[in-house]
Every structure is written in C-alpha cells, then in structure tokens.
Amino acid sequence: MRPDRLYLVDMEQAALAIAEFLTGVGERDFLASDLLQSAILQKLSVIGEAAARISLTVREQNPQVEWGVIVGLRNIVVHAYFSISWSAIWETARSDVPELLEDISRILSELPESDPL
C-alpha cells in the first residue's frame, strides 16, 4: 500500500494543475470549453480517488477536510457523469480546491518523517 504522503502529493499536484488550468479563465470561458471541463474533471477525479485512500488516522486528525464530500464528488464524476452541474464544478474548482490545497500542504508539512516519500 502506498503511504499517505504519496496520496497527499497526488492531491496537491492535481489541485495545483487545476489552479494553473484556470489562470485567467472566467466562468463563461470554462462553461464553453470541453477541453477545460475535461481537464478539471480529470484532476478532481484524481483528488477524489487519492482522498479515498488516505488512512483513517490522517482523516481523523484533519476533520476540517471534507474527505467524504471529496470522495463523493469523485463517485459522481465517474459513475453519474451525466448529472454533472458544470456551474457546481466551476465553483468547486475556483473556491473549494484552493482551500483544499492549503489544507493538504499543511498536512504534508506536519506528517512525521517516518512516513516515506
């Protein structure tokens, strides 16, 4: 099994990619771009999949992170893709992902050294 650190790094990298993809992009541009929508959705899926694999210990130590909501979004993206609200995805990418990135960066900085890369 991969260590938590690697899953957290996956989440961090996906969140950074989302921020990069949306630099200079407005909601109208996002809603009109299948390419951007697909890219953001893929990174949200990575975040959700990695979140599902974070140990119970780390999740319990970080209750401010809405682990269940993150995994739930991944499940919608993968299994109920036809019901996606693109406006909700936009809000998630613009508002929630930056907050998550801060939390993940903090968690990574606090992980004990014994958790290998």
Image: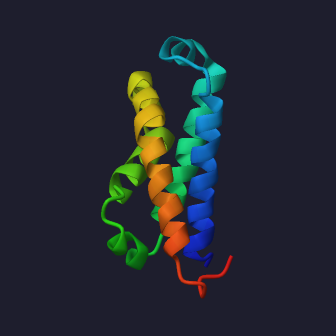
Please, which residue is most extreme toward the bottom here?
114
For residue 36, side relative to residue 68 (left or right): right
Q: Which quadrant of the rendered structure holds the C terminus? A: bottom right
Q: Residue at x 45, y 75 (%)?
A: 55
Image height of 111 relative to 85, above or below: below
Q: Residue at x 54, y 70 (%)?
A: 109
x, y (%) of residue 81?
Answer: 47, 33
Q: Residue at x 62, y 62 (%)?
A: 9
Image height of 72 relative to 84, above or below: below
Q: Nearer the viewer, residue 84 or 36?
A: 36
Q: Nearer the viewer, residue 63 or 88?
A: 63
Q: Residue at x 54, y 68 (%)?
A: 108
What scheme was used to colour the molecule? Answer: rainbow
Image height of 3 relative to 17, above or below: below
For residue 35, side relative to residue 45 (left or right): right
Q: Is residue 53 visible?
A: no
Q: Which quadrant of the rendered structure holds the N terminus? A: bottom right
Q: Is residue 20 visible?
A: yes
x, y (%) of residue 50?
Answer: 54, 60
x, y (%) of residue 5?
Answer: 59, 71
- Image quarter of residue 18: top right
Q: How many marks?
A: 0
For residue 63, side relative to residue 19 (left or right): left
x, y (%) of residue 17?
Answer: 64, 41
Image height of 101 relative to 112, above or below: above
Q: Nearer the viewer, residue 10 or 34?
A: 10
- Image quarter of residue 29: top right
